[in-house]
Image (tube, helix red, strand yellow):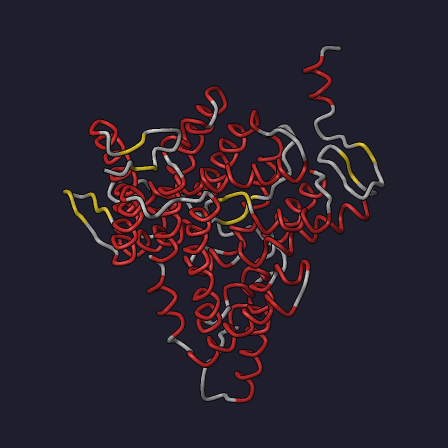
Amino acid sequence: MSEPETRSLNLLSWKLTDNAVVAPEERLTWPRTISIGLQHVVAMFGATFLVPVLTGFPPSTTLFFSGVGTILFLLITRNRLPSYLGSSFAIIAPVTAAVASDGASSALGGLVAVGAMLVVIGLISHFAGVRWIETLMPPVVTGAIVALIGLNLAPAAKNNFVEDPVLATIVLVLLVASAVLFRGLLGRLAIFVSVVVGYVLALILDRIDSDNDYIDTSGIGDAAWVGLPDFQTPTFDLGVLPLFLPVVLVLVVENIGHVKSVAMMTGKDYDATMGRALAADGVATMLAGSGGGSATTTYAENIGVMSATKVYSTAAYWVAGAAAIVLGLSPKVGAVIAAIPPGVLGGVTTALYGLVGVIGVQIWVSNKVDFSKPINQFTAAIPLIIGIADYTWQVGDLVFAGISLGSVAALVIYHSMRLIGGWRGTVDVGRDGQSPRQP
C-alpha cells in the first residue's frame, strides 16, 4: 500500500500514550481525552458566544458552525494541526455596520466574501509560502490594523455600558479581579466567569427589584431543548463589501500567529501546513456565513489550554468540535445566551475591545518596531485616528468606513514611504524596510 493511502487510512487514528506531553498524533485514554476536549469547549465558549450576542446573530447557530468549522479544519489540515475555530472579534464592527445599513443577510454575504478571499490566500500560501504576506504586511502595519479594529468598537462598548452602569461596573471589576485571583485555566476564563456572575446577579436583582428589568428571560422557557439552529441565508451587496476587507488581513495575521505558537509548543514544523490552515479557516467562514454563523479564527484561548495541559492531541479537538455541534442543536442554550443583559455586555466589552487594541500594540512590542522612525510613526498614527474617529468616504454606492480606510491607509503609507524613501536614500530598505537612515 502506498504512503498516501496509508496516511488517508490513518487520518483519524492516534497512538495511545500515557506520557506527560501528548503529541498531536497521540491521545490519552478516551475518558481523559474527552475531559480535555470539554476543557477546550469551556475555554472557547466565553468568547465564541459573545460575538453573536454583540452582532445580533443567533448564538446557537454560531456555536453549531464553530464545531463544524473545527472538524473541517482538522480534516483539511490532515489531522496534524491542533486548533479550535471560534468566533472572530474582528468581524464585530463591520457586521454591526452592515446590519444597521442593509440587514443581517448582507452582513452574512460579507462573511462569505471574507472566507472566499481567505481560501484564495491560503491556496497561494500553500504553493508560494507566507513570506509574501510578511512582506506586504510587516509588523507595524498588522499592529496598526489590529489595534484600530479594537479601538473602533469603543462607542459600541459605551452604548451597552450606559444601559446599566452599576451592573456593568461590577462585571468589569469582576473581570479584572478574576484575571489576577485565579490561576491556570480558571484565570484564562476571566471573561466567562465575569459574564456568568453578572448574569446570576442580574437574575437576583430582577427578583428583588421587580420595578426594573435587569434581564429578559421570557424567551428561555419557550425554547426547546433540542432543535435545529436558526439558519439564515446571505445576500451580496457590493456596498457593504469594503467594510469586510480589513477582516481578511486580521484573520490571516491571527492564523499565522497561532500556527506559529502551536509549532513552538509542539516542536513541529507547520510551515507546509500554513496554507492549508488559512484555506481551512476560509472554508469554515464561508460555510458559517452561508448559514447564519460568525466568521471563525483559530483560538488563542485553546492554545492556552494546550500550554497548561501539555496535551496537543487533535483527538481532544474532535471532542470539542462535536460538543459545540451538540450545544448548537439546543435552542434552550441559545436562548440563555441571548438573554445576557446589556449591562453585563457593557462591562465585558469595555475590557474586551480594549484588549483587541492592545493586541495590536503587542505585535509592535514583540517585533521591536522602532517608533523613532518616521515611516513607523506615520504608518501607525494616521490609521489609528482614522479608525477611532470612524472616518467615512462614499463613492457611489460604496461606503468606506473607518476600519477599511484605516487599513488601506496603513498599507499605502508604509509602502509609499518605503518606496520613496528607498529611492531617495532616506530609508534603509532592508528585510523589514523599517529603518530610515539619518540625514
Q: Position of residue 213 (x, y in %)?
A: 46, 81
Q: Is residue 234 visible?
A: no
- Comparing 187 with 158, the one in front is 187
Q: Is residue 34 visible?
A: yes
Vertical comparison of 231 with 413: above or below: below
Identified at 49% across, 76% down, the residue is 215
| Quadrant where the image shows the C terminus | top left
Left or right: where 100 falls relative to 328: left
Vertical comparison of 284 with 122: above or below: below
Q: Position of residue 92 (x, y in %)?
A: 40, 53
- Residue extending farthest to the front is 439
| Quadrant where the image shows the N terminus | top right
- Comparing 275 with 242, the one in front is 275
- Comparing 161 with 433, the one in front is 433
Q: Quadrant of residue 390?
A: bottom left
Q: Position of residue 285 (x, y in %)?
A: 47, 40
Identified at 29% across, 47% down, the residue is 377
Q: How many marks?
A: 0
Left or right: where 81 falls relative to 235: right
Q: Position of residue 388 (x, y in %)?
A: 29, 57
- Comparing 134 with 309, the one in front is 134
Identified at 62% across, 28% down, the residue is 269
Identified at 54% across, 28% down, the residue is 276
Left or right: where 170 falls relative to 364: right
Q: Quadrant of residue 286?
A: top left
- Residue extending farthest to the left is 396
